[in-house]
Image: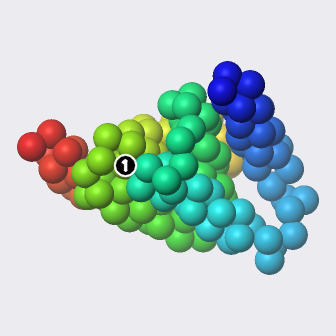
Amino acid sequence: SAIDGQVAFFCANCLYTKVNKNWAQLPEEVRPELGNSMVQILQAVAQQTLNLTPLVVARLCLTLAAVSIRTPGGVEMLLNQSMGFGQMQTDASVLVALELLQDLPIEVENSDMSRQRKLELKGELTGALEGVIQLCEFVLS
């Protein structure tokens, strides 16, 4: 229903804001759990066992991107996860894969991280470009 979509978006938006504004306050042992939970939700969407509006999916993907850039090895994990979603070949999985790939560089650019950290993250993204292009070719074929 429309209210469910609104509530889901509100929750996803709150989570995104908390990750961006209060990451340092989150206990370190909980941080990987948050990323894993986001992946599980997006897997359910990709497998079409959870039906969320595209707006909610987009906000969840942005949240996972925000978690990923703040987690050691997170960018590589997110890129690999995107590749996995893209290869599932459902409309929902391709939506999730492309949304993640779109959101990751946006989140790097918009983050409040140091210039040095942003450059490191951009380097990781550049290193993954060949795989991203392969995924796009796969999705389009």
Query: For the view shown, which residue lies furthest in the front direction?
Result: 1
Point out residue 106 in the picture as x, y percentages from the top left corner: 52, 36
On the question of residue 67 being in view, the answer is yes
Rate crowding at label 1 as few (under 14), some (14 to 19) or many (20 or more) other CA atoms within 10 Å.
Answer: many
98 vs 135: above or below = above
Image x and y of residue 9, in percent? 70, 32
| Position of residue 139 in the picture relative to residue 11 (left or right) | left
- Above or below residue 118? Residue 53 is above
Q: Which is more toward the observer, 58 or 93?
A: 93
Q: Tell me what residue is drawn at x 90 percent, y 59 percent.
A: 25
In the rendered image, which quarter contains the C terminus?
Answer: top left
Q: Is residue 115 left or right of residue 54?
A: right
Residue drawn where x is 44% and y is 39% of the image: 99
Q: Is residue 107 visible?
A: no
Q: Which residue is mark 1?
A: 93
Amino acid under label 1? Ser
Left-right relation of 86 to 76: left
Q: Vertical placement of 135 versus 51: above or below? A: below
* SS label for mark 1: helix
Nearer the observer, 7 or 117: 7
Point out residue 1 in the picture as x, y percentages from the top left corner: 66, 27
Q: How is the image coloured?
A: rainbow
Residue 30 spot, x, y in % from top left: 79, 71
Outermost residue on the bottom side: it is: 29
The image quarter in which residue 21 lies: top right
Query: Which residue is located at x 55 percent, y 31 percent?
Result: 53
Q: Which of the two residues, 2 or 115, is positioned nearer the viewer here?
A: 2
